[in-house]
């Protein structure tokens, strides 16, 4: 297993179409991750989102295949992580399962084990928020902001 990769799987009690919409609608995206942002939800389209106030992520959408797959580049334009915008890749796949959706997130190209650990912690935090929202719940305000 590669050390520059974070892989996360999560079952979500919602259909893939519902889950996918949280990756392709600005207000829905910001409901689970980030306080502000600009998104161009199309292949080659750029995004820039203020995640926590101090940390701003930036990248481009590479592939958008509703409701199954989304690929985007990722990096930090502002904040403490030395990962240049667009230097890593996040792949989201959504698979229908009897109780909803199996979300699989694979974040590739992270430069260090510390970067992998930090991004694993971040993705677990935010995918938990996404899962709660997609299932119709309220995750509350983001205590990381």
Image (spheres, grey):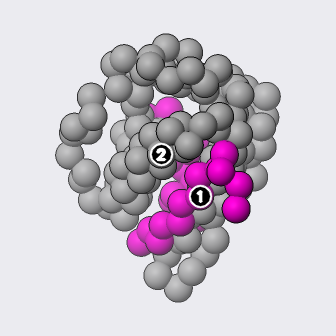
Which residue is labeled 1 in the image?
7
Q: Are there few (<14), some (14-19), or many (20+) residues within 10 Å of tag 2?
A: some
Q: Position of residue 105 (x, y in %)?
A: 59, 55
Could you tell which of marks 2 and 1 lies nearer the N-terminus? Answer: 1
Res 110 quadrant in image:
top right
Q: Position of residue 126 (x, y in %)?
A: 40, 47
Secondary structure beneath disc 2? helix
Q: Is residue 59 magenta?
A: no
- The residue range painted magenta reads 1-27
Which residue is labeled 2 in the image?
117
Determine if residue 31 is in view: yes
Nearer the observer, 54 or 30: 54
Residue in view at x 27 percent, y 59 percent? 137
Nearer the observer, 114 or 30: 114
Name, please, the residue furthest toward the top.
78
Residue in view at x 44 percent, y 19 percent? 80
Q: Position of residue 53 (x, y in %)?
A: 34, 19
Secondary structure beneath disc 1? strand
Determine if residue 47 is in view: no
């Amino acid at each position: 297993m590669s050390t520059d990769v974070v892989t996360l799987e999560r079952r979500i009690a919602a259909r893939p179409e519902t889950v996918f919409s949280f990756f392709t609608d600005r207000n829905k995206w910001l409901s689970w991750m980030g306080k502000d942002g600009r998104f161009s939800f199309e292949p080659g389209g750029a995004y820039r989102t203020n995640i926590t106030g101090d940390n701003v992520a930036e990248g481009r959408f590479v592939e958008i295949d509703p409701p199954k797959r989304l690929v985007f580049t990722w990096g930090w334009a502002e904040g403490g992580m030395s990962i240049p915008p667009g230097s890593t890749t996040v792949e989201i796949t959504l698979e229908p399962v009897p109780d909803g959706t199996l979300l699989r997130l694979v974040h590739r190209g992270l430069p260090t084990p510390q970067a992998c650990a930090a991004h694993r912690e971040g993705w677990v935090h935010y995918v938990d928020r996404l899962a709660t929202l997609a299932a119709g719940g309220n995750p509350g305000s983001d205590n990381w902001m």
